[in-house]
Amino acid sequence: MGKKIEEEKEKEMSFLDHVEILRWHLIRSTGVIFLFAIGAFIMKDFIFNKILFAPKDAEFITYRFFCNVSKLFGAEGLCIDDIPFTFQSLAMAEQFSVHIWTSITVGFIVAFPFIIWEFWKFISPGLYEKERKGAVLFIIISSFLFFIGVLFGYYVVTPLSVNFLGNYSVSEVVERNITLGSYISLVRSSSLASGLIFELPIVMFFLTKMGLITPEFLKKYRKHALVVVLILAAIITPPDIISQVIVGIPIMILYEVSISISKMVIKRERK
């Protein structure tokens, strides 16, 4: 009886009531991000020296992996000895600003499961009882895809970008003095963008539930999707074909997974 009354109340809620509920979900999510951001701010040395500046080192795990792979084929074309650029800070508040925004980004990444949980709580009143029981699975899968994407961005996209852009030169006259803000921005955007792109199957799941897309639609526009993927790969990676292929492959795999998920959703809806 109590459940029925609750459901009736949820149906009778006005638009402003929904906005108010959304506001509190956003406030709670922001609060958790802020708490983790404070922790990241305090751990400045570890985050900057051990994580963010690591792709600048020629001994970074990704560079060693590509070097070992190239040696297996009897070449050393992917081996690097140095990434010849130095950091500099040109603005008075640049280092503090970079520290603040990096802490917020780390806070968002760490708090992602909680953010997804708040998102689920907001949309769950519009779902069937059977669908609501999948909350834990939804949070686990969403968080797993996001963290895998962030790691992919950090260990694959970032090193490719740093190595290519750090070694690129139009003339020997130009010194490679990179501003701190531009380097950190590259690492942040590569990792965060990859994390969000890896949420593609989740997005497709909800679009299918809403009736906006179908498996047939995704199959029909597969070639168009490939073009979009290549454009995305070109945006988040250096402008060389190898980097774009390395980034494009997992995105296309996610697209194919999305087709299967869309099929599954349609099948359940018909039942």
Image (tube, grey):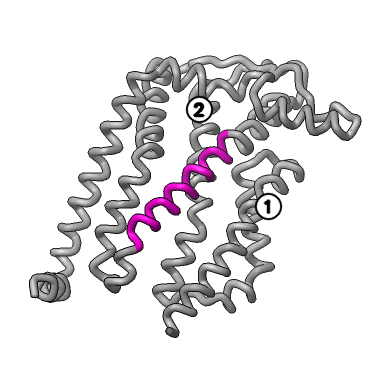
Query: Magenta region's main secondary structure?
Result: helix
Q: Residue at x 39, y 57 (%)?
A: 137
Q: Residue at x 49, y 79 (%)?
A: 267
**Looking at the image, which residue sits at the far bottom?**
270
Q: Residue at x 31, y 45 (%)?
A: 114
Q: Above or below — where is 229 with respect to 44?
A: below
Magenta span includes 45: no
- Say what secondary structure mark 2 lies in: helix
Q: Above or below — where is 68 with respect to 175?
A: below
**CA gap, disc 2 to disc 1?**
26 Å
Comparing marks 2 and 1, which lies closer to the viewer? 1
Q: Which mark is residue 184?
A: 2
Kind of residue at disc 2: Ile
- Say what secondary structure mark 1 lies in: helix
Kind of residue at disc 1: Ile
Image spot of residue 201 (x, y percent): 51, 60
Residue position marked by numbered label 1 in the rendering:
249
Image spot of residue 87 (x, y percent): 56, 16
77 horizontally vs 50: left or right: right
The earlier-in-sequence mark between 2 and 1 is 2
Is there CB contact under 8 Å for labels 2 and 1?
no
Q: Nearer the viewer, residue 129 or 10?
A: 129
